[in-house]
Amino acid sequence: MSPHVSPLFSLDRRTLLAAAGAAGVVAASPALSQEPAMSRLYPIFMAVIEAWHHQDIEGVLVHVTDDIIWRNSSGYAPAIRGKDAMRKALQGMAPIIKTNKWRLFDYAENNDRMFMEGVDEFWLTTGEHVAIPYAGTLEFRGPLICEWREYFDGRISAAMKAGQPMTAELQEMISRPVAR
């Protein structure tokens, strides 16, 4: 009996990406392709990231629904519910962050969902450098984010906020190329 090789393995990268697009999945990853992906959600989220780079809270909020649900604590704290509550949370964060370098490494879109992996890296006004690798999911209602779920290890954040140095493993994780 000869081994069976799936026809999928004989396809080139362009054919695989076209098939993924036809199936409603759009992926953009430096590891998957050097070709630009057809994306409708990624540019919206990149506008959120760009606004936060400037700590432009209203620039972030223009991209979320009034009833946004933001689960930014990996489940150890209650969700932030509503645009006003999100505004208040961001207003609490902004004064303690001197600068940030938030970025995405990989993402995939499927209908009204975007899955992402990245790092939230920032420098506090007290001098600490914090880098938190994370994964997350965004759900969209039209062009607006209606639910935002982030998954990360809070121990990394706590250790770095307490002044512990970045580990070599963490440095390797956050030194990847960003999604384009």
Image: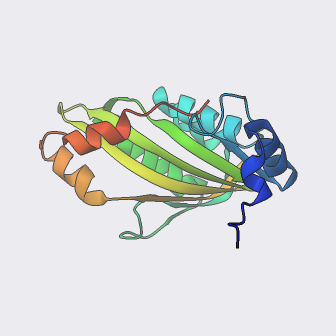
Query: Residue, x 38% and y 69% (percent of image)?
Result: 77
Asked if 54 appears above or below 67 in the picture, the reply is above
Based on the displayed image, in which of its 4 quarters is residue 45 positioned?
A: top right
- The answer to whether 149 is drawn above or below residue 165 in the figure is below
Left or right of 88 in this view: 63? right
Residue closer to the observer: 107 or 42: 107
Is residue 111 something one can see in this rendering? Answer: no
Left or right: residue 73 versus residue 104 is: left
For the point 25% across and 44% down, which residue is it?
Answer: 169
User: In the current view of this chain or complex, which residue is farthest to the right?
Assistant: 22
Q: Nearer the viewer, residue 17 or 140?
A: 17
Residue at 75% over, 60% down: 6
Q: Position of residue 166 (x, y in %)?
A: 19, 40
* In the displayed structure image, the side of residue 113 where residue 80 appears, left or right: left
**In the rendering, at what x and y percent does residue 87 appear?**
51, 48
**Front position in the image: 80 or 27:** 27
Q: How many marks?
A: 0
Dividing the picture into quarters, in which one does residue 128 lie?
A: top left
Q: Decide if residue 84 is in sight here.
A: yes
Image quadrant holding the C terminus, namely top right
Q: Residue at x 23, y 31 (%)?
A: 125
